[in-house]
Image: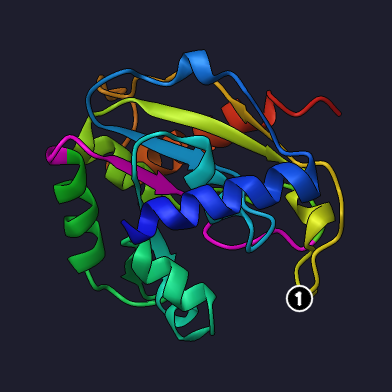
Amino acid sequence: MVYSIIKFVSFAFFKLYLDFKIYGKGNIPRKGAFIVAANHASYLDPLLLVVTFRKNLYFIARQRLFAVPLIGWVLKQVKAIPVKRHGKDTGPIKNALSVLREGKILAVFPEGTRSKNRKFKTAKPGVGFIVSKAKVPVLPVYIESSFDAQPRGIRTLKRYPVRVHIGKPIDFSKEPARFHKAELYQAIGDEIMRAIAAMKKF
């Protein structure tokens, strides 16, 4: 119920204030579990994904964000899975895989943290690990101009057009035998980021 209210209010606000538009909805799988993988440049990004998809999303988010006023509350309402930035806690990964086994949608930001200058960062291998184990399609998503609407370090929101571009699903179910495990996970993350970057016009 709370998730639906957050989605409705956020969509109305983004539509009016940011001229929010979505492209590529036809690429969204109609059934079954899949992973939404998007670039990350602003605190707005999770909410932008929430309003983009009809079904509920489950997020992986850094644990410290849960202590941030409002942001932490929103993360709890959208059932985000907390993960420590450093450490060997396997709990979040197990929870993420459990979500996918239940046929739900997991949303991740392969870069792991927000960009400081609009440029894409290198994917973290942890995303590749989840994709490799889950064996579900990955839906690349490019969030355009969220950095301009709310850059890193700026709390106020600027009136700037924001767009979400949805790419075609990628199938990673057949792992390349030529890669060792560590290389495979990074290779998957890198391919996801290339698919996201391919939707950027300039």
- Please give the name of the residue rendered at 34% of the width and 36% of the height, measured from the top-left corner: 55
Residue sticking out furthest to the top: 26
Is 42 colored magenta in this rendering? no
Q: Where is residue 94 in the image (x, y as percent from the top left)?
A: 17, 57
Disc 1 crowd rating (10 Å Cα; few below 14, some 14-19, many 20+) is: few
**Foreground pick, 5 / 101:** 5
- The residue positioned 53% from the left and 83% from the top of the image is 68
Q: What element carries label 1?
A: loop
Residue 52 versus residue 94 in the image, above or below: above
Q: Quadrant location of the C terminus?
A: top right
Taking the spot 58% from the left edge, 36% from the top edge, the residue there is: 193
For the image, the number of numbered tags is 1
- Tag 1: amino acid: Arg
Q: Position of residue 34 (x, y in %)?
A: 31, 31
Closer to us: 26 or 93: 26
Which residue does the numbered mark 1 point to in the structure image? 155
Task: Judge whether residue 107 is colored magenta.
Answer: yes
Q: In this view, does 171 lie above or below 115?
A: above
Q: Can residue 110 be seen in this view?
A: no
Residue 153 figure quarter: bottom right
Q: Quadrant of the N terminus?
A: bottom left
> Residue 89, position in %: x, y?
24, 73
Q: Residue at x 12, y 40 (%)?
A: 102
Looking at the image, residue 46 sits to the left or right of residue 172; the answer is right
> Where is residue 168 shown, x and y percent of the image?
49, 16
Q: Main secondary structure of the magenta part?
A: loop
- Which residues make up the magenta segment? 101-116
Report if residue 5 is visible in the image. yes
Classify 15 as above or below 167: below
The image quadrant of residue 181 is top left
- Left or right, 32 with reference to 141: left
Coloring basis for residues: rainbow
